[in-house]
Image (cartoon, grey):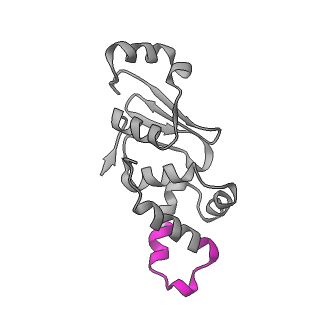
Amino acid sequence: MTYQASEELAQILINHGFKETTESKYPAFYNYMKVNGYNPDNVKRSFSYGRRGHIIFDYINMINYKGFASFDKLRLEEIELKLLLEYFKLPTKTLTILKKESENLFDLIDKYNSICDKDEKYLRASEKKIKAMFERIKSQDLAA
């Protein structure tokens, strides 16, 4: 399944701890949305997760400009969305480990796939953390 800028994705972000910040970041779009509803072709939206994360629906594009988890996409695959939601909740120590393993958050998906091909006894501690994280998020329910 893929996700794009939509009310459904906005609700998933909110249900997973993001706060909508459209009113303060884009007041004109917020007022337009109150009157006319949300249409990604006409409106920008903004969501934040503490100081760590900021996702913008720039009309139909979804953007995060912050470092390791930066992206600019029209669509997110389900595993990418789950990984993104997990990323913002991880402790700093785990984030440091992940950043040493990959240049970008979504590159960890390929890393995970290569780890799955290895015998468990040959995995480094960081690879075991990545594998455990993916096993956890693969079963995550986005509706929760």
- Image vertical order of residue 4 relative to residue 91, above or below: above
Nearer-the-camera pick, 96 or 18: 18
Main SS, magenta region, reads helix
Residue located at (43% from left, 50% from top): 81
- Image vertical order of residue 119 relative to residue 109, above or below: below
Q: Quadrant of residue 62?
A: top left
Q: Is residue 133 left or right of residue 38?
A: right
Q: Quadrant of residue 122?
A: bottom right
User: Is 122 inside the magenta-drawn segment?
Assistant: yes
- Image vertical order of residue 130 relative to residue 140, above or below: below
Residue located at (34% from left, 37% from top): 8
Q: Quadrant of residue 49?
A: top right
Q: Which residues are magenta?
A: 111-127
Q: Position of residue 26 (x, y in %)?
A: 51, 19
Q: Is residue 60 left or right of residue 85?
A: left
Residue located at (52% from left, 41% from top): 17
Residue located at (68% from left, 59% from top): 96
